[in-house]
Image: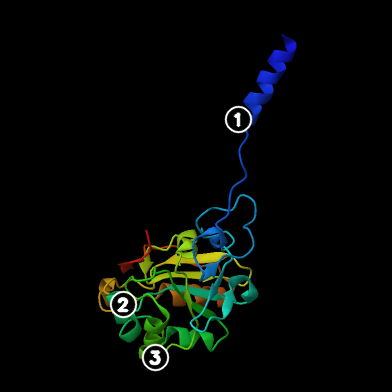
Amino acid sequence: MRRLTLCALLVLAACNRKEPASSVDAATAPTTQSATGPAAPAGEAEHAEVGRHAPDFRLKDLDGKEVQLSTFKGKTVVLEWFNPGCPFVKASHTKGSLKDAAKRHTKNGVVWLAVNSGAPGKQGAGVETNREAAKTFSLDHPILLDESGAVGKAYGATNTPHMYVVDEKGTLVYKGAIDNSPDGEGQSAPDGKLVSYVDAAIADLGAGKPVGTAETKAYGCSVKYGK
């Protein structure tokens, strides 16, 4: 009887045992374009959260060169979720807050990476489409292809543009909209005062201060994930 009771307790304990939190790993996703890097630290949230370590990843650029986020530790990194077919992206890169933003900041040592999580066949996806966009928008920074959508989903990217700022320690310090002008053109800001949240976050980091506005609601087109 005591043996049966002991066995029952062991079975119950096994059923109630919590599995360790899993990290997103694009290497297990059906794709040849992307893979995440090392597993996230124990207890890391599935989606990127401000104040926590930004999930590492590896993605290929338009020339097939692999880029890994963690190799930029020691630098501020901006991640821009990108879709060249999205009207909001077009407006922001030609008339709004993204026009020349990457050039301004990379000149001062910031790393700027565009990430396209559009699935094959979706709006704005594909190497050639993005090469043409780089020429049209005069982009010098890498455009990374996340065709499986694994990295976009790990970051909780919902819109294009959706912006993320990672500090020198690898901590996510800002996520959300590029600015407070939802038309994407810098003309619909409240009271006519345009605020670039990304510019402000980078300025705060440069001044050694906590980021004043750490999270906002992104606007734009939906990310064109696959099914």
Q: Amino acid at mark 1?
A: Cys
Side of 119 where 45 appears, left or right: right
**Image-quadrant location for residue 129:** bottom left
Q: Crowding near pointer 3: few (<14 within 10 Å), some, many (20+)?
A: few
Q: Which quadrant is the N terminus positioned in?
A: top right
Q: Nearer the viewer, residue 23 or 203?
A: 23
**Image-quadrant location for residue 87:** bottom left
> Element under label 2?
loop
Q: Which residue extends farthest right?
A: 3
Pointer 3: what residue? 135
Q: Amino acid at mark 3?
A: Lys
Q: Position of residue 57 (x, y in %)?
A: 57, 67
Q: Nearer the viewer, residue 82 or 195?
A: 82
Q: Which residue extends farthest top?
A: 1
Q: Position of residue 160 (x, y in %)?
A: 36, 70
Is 49 located above or below residue 220 in the figure? above
Side of 190 where 100 appears, left or right: right
Pointer 2: what residue? 85
Residue 213 visible to an observer of this rendering: no
Query: Residue 166: which disc?
Result: none
Q: Amino acid at mark 2?
A: Gly
Residue at 74% across / 11% down in the picture? 2
Is 63 located above or below residue 201 in the figure? below
Q: Crowding near pointer 1: few (<14 within 10 Å), some, many (20+)?
A: few
Residue at 69% across / 14% down in the picture? 5
Side of 64 where 183 appears, left or right: left
Q: Which quadrant is the C terminus positioned in?
A: bottom left
Pointer 1: what residue? 15
> Element under label 1?
helix
